[in-house]
Image (spheres, grey):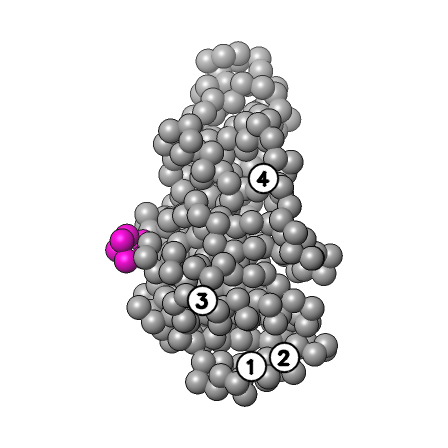
Amino acid sequence: MKTSVAICTYNGERFLKKQIDSILNQTIPVDEIVICDDCSTDSTLSILNFYKERFPSIFKIHVNDHNLGCVKNFEKAVSCCENEIIFLCDQDDIWKAEKVSFFLNHFKENISLKVLASNAWIVDESENVIDKNTIWDVVSFLHKRNIEYDFFTIFSVVGNLATGANMAFRKSFVSSALPFPEKYFYHDEWISLSASSKKQFGFMEEKTSFYRVHSSQQVGGVFFDSSKNTEKNLLRRFDVNSKCYSFREIKRRIRSLNQNRKKIISVSANSHNKVLNDALQIIENFEINLKNDLKRKSYLKYLFYKIFYFQ
């Protein structure tokens, strides 16, 4: 299986070399590295040209004539990739040497999967590992408790739990995901939702990279204190089959439903997409079930939530 890596750069001089070196040092070499630079003003292009001169057959560098922004720049980079498996890559992380191997083996063993994501370590600017939980740990928490789940339902009702920095997909999937929505969705969020709607999304619990947290990054992760209490809170949030009992849990669930519905309707105004329609239907059905549960417990409480929280 030949591989492509899609990297988007923007003023990434501080950490770019280590990211690229970690890609070049994979136990299974990558076949193509496509980089789209979004009008950098620092030494990013000099760094990229240095690697292009050393590895002319691997590196393909595109420089935008105007700023596209993160989502549309990744759309361009993905469109330029030619090989069977496409990895998304940030400009400031570090890949574990076996990352490509992990992903390729998983794709080979799971033919039906089109998109695959993984967990990651969190590191600071000096590459010290930070002891934090993230939403990427949710799949492990669900498995540990033997909780059944459906990715499309989670993504529709709660939100995304995968990051593009640890994501790869088959080229055959690209046509169904492009173009990325102009607004409201990040590219990785849209990819996850699209693939999961067809049961084609998978998540590896293995940590395959070091996700760097620093002050100048464009998009960061969601991190929490590493504790049993955090694990319980994340499970309450992402286990959509669990019943909400506390005021806080119910309010948070309704807020997520309202926000996700609004986002999907906003995108649907410019795109008649089956993925969006299916996600909206899940939200509507979930809200009906939640309302019915509230009515059974206490009609007065249901009226309270209806007046102040449900839209």
Query: What is the x, y in percent for residue 212?
Result: 63, 56
* Dots 2, 1 in contact, CB < 8 A: yes
Residue at the disc numbered 3: 26
| Number of residues whose C-alpha sits closer than 10 Å to that of mark 4, classed few (under 14), some (14–19) or many (20 or more) | many
Disc 4 is placed on an element classified as strand
The range drawn in magenta is 107-113
CA separation in Å, label 3 and label 4: 26 Å
**Above or below — where is 236 with respect to 89?**
above
* Dots 3, 1 in contact, CB < 8 A: no
Disc 1 is placed on an element classified as helix
Q: Amino acid at mark 1?
A: Tyr
CA separation in Å, label 4 and label 1: 35 Å
**First of labels 3, 1 by sequence position:** 3
CA separation in Å, label 4 and label 2: 33 Å
CA separation in Å, label 3 and label 2: 20 Å
Query: What is the x, y in percent for residue 81?
Result: 42, 74
Q: Amino acid at mark 3?
A: Gln
Residue at the disc numbered 2: 47
Question: Hey, which quadrant is residue 94 in on the image?
Answer: bottom right
**How many tags in the picture?**
4
**Above or below — where is 206 with respect to 256?**
below
| Number of residues whose C-alpha sits closer than 10 Å to that of mark 3, classed few (under 14), some (14–19) or many (20 or more) | some
* Dots 3, 2 in contact, CB < 8 A: no
Disc 3 is placed on an element classified as loop
Marking on residue 51: 1
**First of labels 3, 2 by sequence position:** 3
- The residue at the point 66 percent across, 60 percent down is 218
Q: Left or right: 272 with respect to 310?
A: left
* Dots 3, 4 in contact, CB < 8 A: no
